[in-house]
């Protein structure tokens, strides 16, 4: 039973990662922002191998940020000029 729930969570995370990658590719943002988001997705993917539930939480937070239009700052840009 435990294994079935782990497999279901794995499938859910895998599907959400696919959706997140597609959304990031489609964003109209500077390339630096897109790269930062892609790095976040790669880190979440790597962490899923060791902590699937933690990766699912991180992915949910990232998707929520995307939904709300909150993106990381472009590298080299800090605050006001």
Image (spheres, helix red, strand yellow):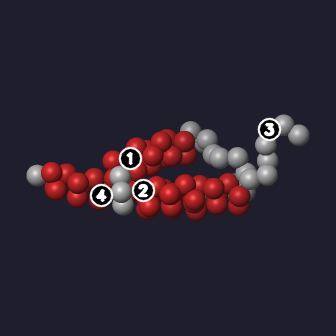
Q: Please say whether residue 67 is visible from this viewpoint.
A: no
Q: Residue at x 44, y 49 (%)?
A: 59
Q: Which secondary structure lies at badge 4? A: helix
In the rendered structure, the answer to whether residue 35 lies left or right of residue 16 reads right
Rounded to the nearest angstrom, the CA distance separating label 3 from label 1 is 30 Å
Residue 10, disc: 4
Q: Nearer the viewer, residue 36 or 29?
A: 36
Mark toward the start of the polypeptide (2 vs 4) = 4
Q: Residue at x 55, y 55 (%)?
A: 40
Q: Which secondary structure lies at badge 1? A: helix
Q: Which of 55 and 21 is in front in this view?
A: 55
Q: Nearer the viewer, residue 11 or 25?
A: 11
Residue 34 position within the rendered picture, expressed as x and y whole percent measured from the top left: 64, 58
Q: Nearer the viewer, residue 46 or 8?
A: 46
Q: Are marks 2 and 1 in contact (CB under 8 Å)?
A: yes
Rounded to the nearest angstrom, the CA distance separating label 2 from label 4 is 12 Å
């Amino acid at each position: 039973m435990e294994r079935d729930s782990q497999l279901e969570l794995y499938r859910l995370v895998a599907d959400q990662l696919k959706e997140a990658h597609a959304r990031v590719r489609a964003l109209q943002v500077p390339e630096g922002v897109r790269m930062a988001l892609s790095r976040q997705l790669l880190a979440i993917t790597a962490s899923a191998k060791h902590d699937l539930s933690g990766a699912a939480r991180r992915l949910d937070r990232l998707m929520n940020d995307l939904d709300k239009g909150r993106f990381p700052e472009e590298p080299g840009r800090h605050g006001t000029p």
